Image: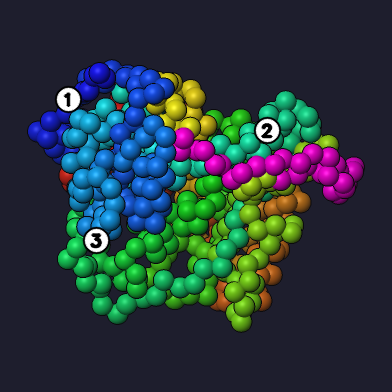
């Protein structure tokens, strides 16, 4: 019989109220290949509801408890129903938790779970700001837990094999990378009066470490993604999948060295503040990386998404000998001539979008080996941190003209093309260019995970944000 770690309500509540409370390191328990992993799912909306079905039907796994601040979402879900996630963390029978809450809860819930002796599968983005992501990584080590990130494409054989070829030098030196996602998303609306929170939602629990502010958007669920108090915009919603691929394929375990961003929220006068057009230029360990999202149609009378070099998302990696175009499900490498013009395909990377990612988590638990994970929290922290850096430069930005943006960006073929395409799309949409913002160029120390140099004082205020009393993200020390 496996040995369970004890975890009392008194101890747990003391920790949630005071982040500095001491914990003993939980012994690592190996369940064995044939022993069932008992799971609690925290956050059971769209993605979490899917996880309930997937983990409960998986060989060697059962869902025995679910939690959601919206009690109505637990109807029909398996296991014990707990509106407060802390009840699941107290359950001795729960071996692992799956966290599919809104973004602002990801890090705190994962840290609490590690402290409670649970293994963790945490959805992307793993953090709402950089510092708390680092605390997740430290908690994983301190409490000897297995922590997987929900960037399932890292289980895709196309991404794995492509990364092996790039790191082995098959295509020569990397000249630049373009990492992006195109969408066409509408307005979230704007109420004249704050939303009346339904009785079946415990808003205090839902807000957790984030502000418990009035809500002026039309829908309670999902559209929080576009409000930076709780969400991280399209960078943290979709593009984090592709920054995860980027970090994995290029072998980047730390964050970039510099960033400058430009963009804005255009077309809609709504209750959201996340930019729906944003691009960033980064120096990533000597590799020029362009990060881009576009959430607007190509014309006002159309819902058609934009495209970049014929694609609507993924990574375009320009190397000396080839250009690689890869996204969810696979991609190809194309030979290039001396001018970088793509020719015939020289390699196809067939994939499945990451099928088996959740099973990879369960198998690692049964083996007691964090090293078996395809998306360990450390790579999730790097992938998420890239997105946070992009947003931080944007948030420190000032109004700028298109010519000012053109002048600020480096003389790089990819960034030049990105600037012109975004400006052309905005012009076609006939939007107010007065909303165009240009952030400062920020220098980042990836070892200390702090900004240095000019504008560092303002930027570092956005690396670690204040949590609400009772939901403070703890500083984890070994």
Q: Quadrant of residue 87?
A: top left
Secondary structure under tag 1 reads loop
The stretch in magenta equals 331-359
Q: Which mark is residue 161?
A: 2
Residue position for label 3: 72
For label 3, count other residues whose C-alpha is less than 10 Å away and answer few (under 14), some (14-19) or many (20+): some
Query: Closer to the observer: label 3 or label 1?
Result: 3
Vertical placement of residue 43 versus 134, above or below: below
Gap in angstroms between the C-alphas marked 3 and 2:
43 Å
109 vs 264, left or right, is left
Which residue appears at 21% of the width and 72% of the height?
196
Image marks 3 and 1: residues in contact by CB distance under 8 Å: no
Vertical placement of residue 224 versus 452, above or below: below
Magenta-drawn stretch contains 418: no
In the rendered image, is residue 44 in sight?
yes
Mark with earlier residue (2, 1): 1
Mark with earlier residue (3, 2): 3
Image marks 3 and 2: residues in contact by CB distance under 8 Å: no
Magenta-drawn stretch contains 357: yes
Q: Which mark is residue 379?
A: none
137 vs 302, left or right, is left
Secondary structure under tag 3 reads helix
Vertical placement of residue 60 versus 50, above or below: above
For label 1, count other residues whose C-alpha is less than 10 Å away and answer few (under 14), some (14-19) or many (20+): few
332 vs 384, left or right, is right
Which residue appears at 83% of the width and 44% of the height?
345
193 vs 104, left or right, is left
Position of the C terminus by quadrant: top left
**Residue at the left extreme, as displayed:** 10
Secondary structure under tag 2 reads helix
Residue position for label 1: 6
């Amino acid at each position: 019989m496996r040995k369970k770690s004890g975890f009392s309500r008194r101890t747990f509540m003391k920790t949630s109220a005071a982040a500095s409370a001491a914990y003993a390191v939980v012994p690592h328990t190996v369940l064995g290949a044939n022993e069932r992993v008992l799971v609690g799912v925290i956050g059971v909306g769209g993605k979490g509801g899917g996880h309930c079905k997937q983990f409960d039907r998986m060989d060697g796994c059962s869902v025995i408890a679910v939690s959601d601040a919206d009690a109505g979402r637990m109807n029909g879900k398996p296991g014990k129903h707990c509106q407060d996630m802390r009840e699941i963390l107290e359950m001795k029978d729960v071996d692992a938790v799956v966290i599919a809450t809104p973004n602002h809860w990801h890090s705190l819930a994962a840290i609490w779970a590690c402290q409670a002796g649970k293994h963790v599968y945490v959805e992307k983005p793993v953090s709402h700001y950089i510092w708390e992501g680092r605390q997740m990584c430290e908690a994983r080590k301190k409490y000897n837990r297995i922590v997987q990130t929900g960037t399932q494409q890292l289980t895709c054989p196309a991404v794995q094999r492509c990364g092996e070829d790039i790191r082995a030098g098959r295509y020569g030196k990397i000249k630049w990378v373009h990492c992006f996602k195109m969408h066409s998303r509408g307005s979230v609306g704007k109420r004249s009066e704050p939303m009346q929170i339904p009785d079946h939602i415990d808003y205090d629990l839902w807000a957790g470490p984030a502000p418990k502010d009035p809500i002026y958007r039309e829908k309670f669920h999902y559209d929080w993604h576009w409000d930076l108090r709780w969400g991280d915009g399209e960078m943290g919603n979709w593009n984090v999948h592709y920054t995860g691929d980027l970090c994995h394929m290029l072998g980047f375990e730390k964050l970039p060295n510099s960033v400058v961003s430009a963009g804005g929220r255009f077309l809609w006068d709504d209750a959201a503040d996340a930019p729906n057009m944003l691009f960033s230029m980064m120096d990533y360990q000597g590799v020029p990386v362009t990060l881009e999202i576009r959430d607007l149609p190509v014309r006002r009378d159309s819902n058609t998404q934009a495209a970049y070099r014929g694609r609507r998302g993924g990574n375009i990696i320009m190397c000396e000998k080839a250009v690689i175009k890869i996204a969810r499900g696979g991609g190809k490498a194309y030979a290039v001539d001396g001018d970088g013009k793509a020719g015939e395909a020289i390699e196809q990377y067939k994939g499945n979008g990451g099928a088996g990612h959740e099973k990879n988590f369960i198998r690692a638990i049964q083996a007691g080996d964090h090293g078996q994970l395809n998306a360990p929290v450390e790579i999730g922290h790097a992938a998420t941190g890239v997105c946070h850096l992009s947003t931080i430069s944007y948030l420190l930005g000032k109004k700028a003209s298109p010519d000012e943006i053109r002048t600020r960006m480096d003389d790089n073929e990819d960034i030049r093309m990105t600037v012109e395409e975004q400006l052309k799309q905005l012009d076609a949409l006939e939007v107010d260019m007065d909303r165009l913002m240009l952030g400062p160029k920020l220098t980042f120390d990836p070892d200390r995970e702090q900004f240095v140099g000019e504008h560092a004082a303002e930027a570092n205020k956005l690396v670690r944000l204040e949590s609400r009393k009772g939901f403070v993200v703890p500083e984890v020390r070994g």
